[in-house]
């Protein structure tokens, strides 16, 4: 899951570069870059929603006790280690 979040963040940054280039740069003058910027704007919305969903799933699993790091040292504190 950590690698997926890294990829989503890289795509998010790339999309923001295209949007900023469209607004402040010369991307709006070239038709190919204008189309890519429109796709990037839609992709930013999708990536934002996806990232929030992944973080919420991670937090819900942590609070439900399904997180794999939950209580990982209790065996050693109770003296029942192998």
Image (cartoon, rainbow, N blue to C red):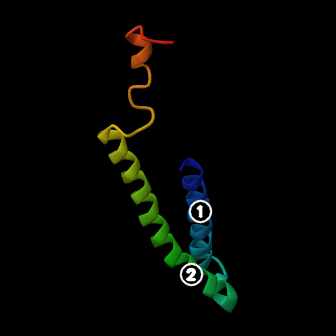
Res. 81 mark? none
Q: Secondary structure at mark 1?
A: helix
Q: Residue at x 55, y 48 (%)?
A: 2
Foreground pick, 44 / 24:
44
Q: Give the quadrant of residue 28.
A: bottom right
Residue 58 appearing in the image: yes
Along the polypeptide, which appears first: circle 2 or circle 1?
Answer: 1
In this picture, residue 42 sits left or right of residue 63 = right
Q: Callout 1: few (<14), some (14-19), or many (20+) C-alpha neighbours within 10 Å?
A: few
* Alpha-carbon span between mark 2 and mark 1: 14 Å
Q: Residue at x 56, y 60 (%)?
A: 8
Foreground pick, 1 / 81:
81
Q: How far across and down, in percent of the image, does residue 59 sit? A: 36, 45
**Residue at far left of view:** 64
Q: Secondary structure at mark 2?
A: helix
Residue receiving disc 1:
13
Foreground pick, 4 / 81:
81
Foreground pick, 47 / 22:
47
65 is higher (above) or lower (below) than 4: above
39 is higher (above) or lower (below) than 13: below
Q: How far across and down, in percent of the image, does residue 47 sit? A: 49, 66
Please give the count of numbered marks on the rendered protein: 2
Residue 30 appearing in the image: no
In this picture, residue 16 sits left or right of residue 78 = right
Q: Callout 2: few (<14), some (14-19), or many (20+) C-alpha neighbours within 10 Å?
A: some
Residue receiving disc 2:
39
In this picture, residue 29 sits left or right of residue 66 = right
**Residue at far top of view:** 79
56 is higher (above) or lower (below) than 41: above
Q: Give the quadrant of residue 37.
A: bottom right
**Residue at far front of view:** 82
């Amino acid at each position: 899951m950590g690698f997926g979040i890294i990829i989503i963040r890289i795509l998010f940054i790339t999309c923001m570069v295209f949007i900023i280039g469209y607004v402040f740069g010369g991307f709006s003058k070239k038709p190919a870059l204008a189309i890519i910027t429109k796709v990037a704007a839609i992709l930013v919305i999708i990536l934002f929603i996806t990232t929030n969903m992944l973080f919420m799933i991670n937090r819900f699993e942590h609070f439900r006790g399904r997180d794999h790091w939950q209580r990982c040292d209790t065996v050693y504190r109770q003296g029942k280690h192998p």
